[in-house]
Amino acid sequence: MRLDGGRTLAVVGESGSGKTITGRAIMRLLPRGASARGRIVVAGREMLSADERELRRARGSDVAMVFQDSMSALSPYLDIGAHIAQAVRLHDPSVTRRAARARAVEMLDRVGIPGPADAVRRFPHEFSGGMRQRAVIAMALVNRPALLIADEPTTALDVTVQAQILALLRELQQEYGMAMLLISHDFGVVGSAADDVLVLYAGRQAEYGSLRDIFDHPAHPYTAGLRAATPRLDARLDTGGERTRLRAIPGAPTSLRDAGPGCAFAPRCGLADQVGERCVVEAPLPTVRPTSEGGGLHLAACHLDRLPATQEVAR
Ligand code: SF4
C-alpha cells in the first residue's frame, strides 16, 4: 500500500480493530512485547530496520503523530512555546533558542491561535481543548514532516471545533504537500477528509479502496455494516426528509488474539450462512474488486464475489 504526498488515507474500524497500533507501528512506538513485520518506508527511510538514532531523526521530521488526547502530548510544566521550540531543536540542534522560539510564534499564528506572541508563554491548562489541539498540530508540523499520523484528532472535541480542526489539517496538508494517515472510528469524519480508506477488522484488512468505492460500492459486509450505521444527510434529502433507519452492527468486535482460522467477522456476518463452512475454516485473503469511475485499487477480504443489493449484511 502506498500513500503519496497531499493524499489522506483513513484507517477505520471499531475499537480494538488495530487502527492505533498501525499508526504506532509506523512510528516504531509499539507497546512492549509487540512487533511489526513487513516493510514500512517513510520518505525513503526503512522504519523497521532503522536504529534508535535514525528513528529519533525520523520522528518529527519524516513522520509526526497527533493524538486524540492533547493533554497527554503536552507537559503541564512547560509553556506552549517551549514544546514547539523543543521540537525544532531536536530536529536541528544548531537552531538557537531564540530562533526556535520565534518559529513557535510563527507556527501558533499559522494554526490560528490568536495573539501568538502571548500564547507561546501560556501553559497547556490555560488553553481550551480546541486551542490545545491546534498547539499540538503546530508542534507536530513545525518540522514539516512528509507524513502526519492523526489518531482520532477530533474525537474529544465538540462538533464545530471538530470541523475547524479537520479543515485546518486539510489546509496545512495541501500547503506542505504532506501525506496524512487519519485514524478514526467515525465514518462521518472519514467521509469529509479521506481520499482512500482502509477498513480494519480484528487486526486484519477487511477492505481498501477509494472513498467513493468504500462509501458507495462496499464489497465487504463489515464495511457495509459501518456504512449503514452512519447517519447520511443526503439519504434524508433523497427520502424527502423521512428519517432513514440506522442499523448498528450487532455483537462485539473480535480481537486478533481470539480470531479462529476462518473469517474473524463470521460470528457477526449476516451473509456467512450463504457461503457456509468456508467462512468458518478459511480466512479470506484480500482480492481485487471492481472500481467506480476514477477509482484506484479496490480490495476486499471476503469469500463472496459481490454483496447482494438489499440483504442485511450483519446478523
Ligand atoms: Fe461474511 Fe464470510 Fe465474507 Fe467473512 S468471508 S465477511 S463471514 S461472507
Image (cartoon, grey):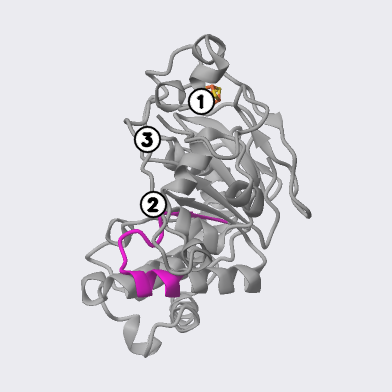
Determine whether, in the image, residue 254 is placed left or right of residue 147: left
Q: Kindly state the secondary structure of the residue where label 1 is placed.
A: loop
Determine whether, in the image, residue 194 is placed left or right of residue 157: right
- Give the residue at x 60% y 20%: 284
The quadrant of the image that shows the N terminus is top right
Query: Ligand 1: does it lie within 8 Å of the C-beta at label 3?
Result: no
Amino acid, disc 2? Arg
Q: Is residue 277 visible?
A: yes
The CA span between labels 2 and 1 is 20 Å
- The earlier-in-sequence mark between 2 and 1 is 2
Q: What range of the chain is rendered magenta?
A: 148-165
Amino acid, disc 1? Leu
Q: Is residue 29 visible?
A: no
- Which mark is drawn over residue 245? 2
Identify the residue position indicated by label 3 in the image.
16
Instruction: Give the answer, above or below, for where 98 lies relative to 264.
Output: below
- Give the residue at x 53% y 13%: 276
x and y percentages locating residue 88 in the rendered image: 49, 67
- Give the residue at x 74% y 49%: 292
- Confirm whether the magenta stretch covers residue 157: yes
Q: Kindly state the secondary structure of the residue where label 2 is placed.
A: loop
The CA span between labels 2 and 3 is 26 Å
x and y percentages locating residue 171 in the rendered image: 57, 74
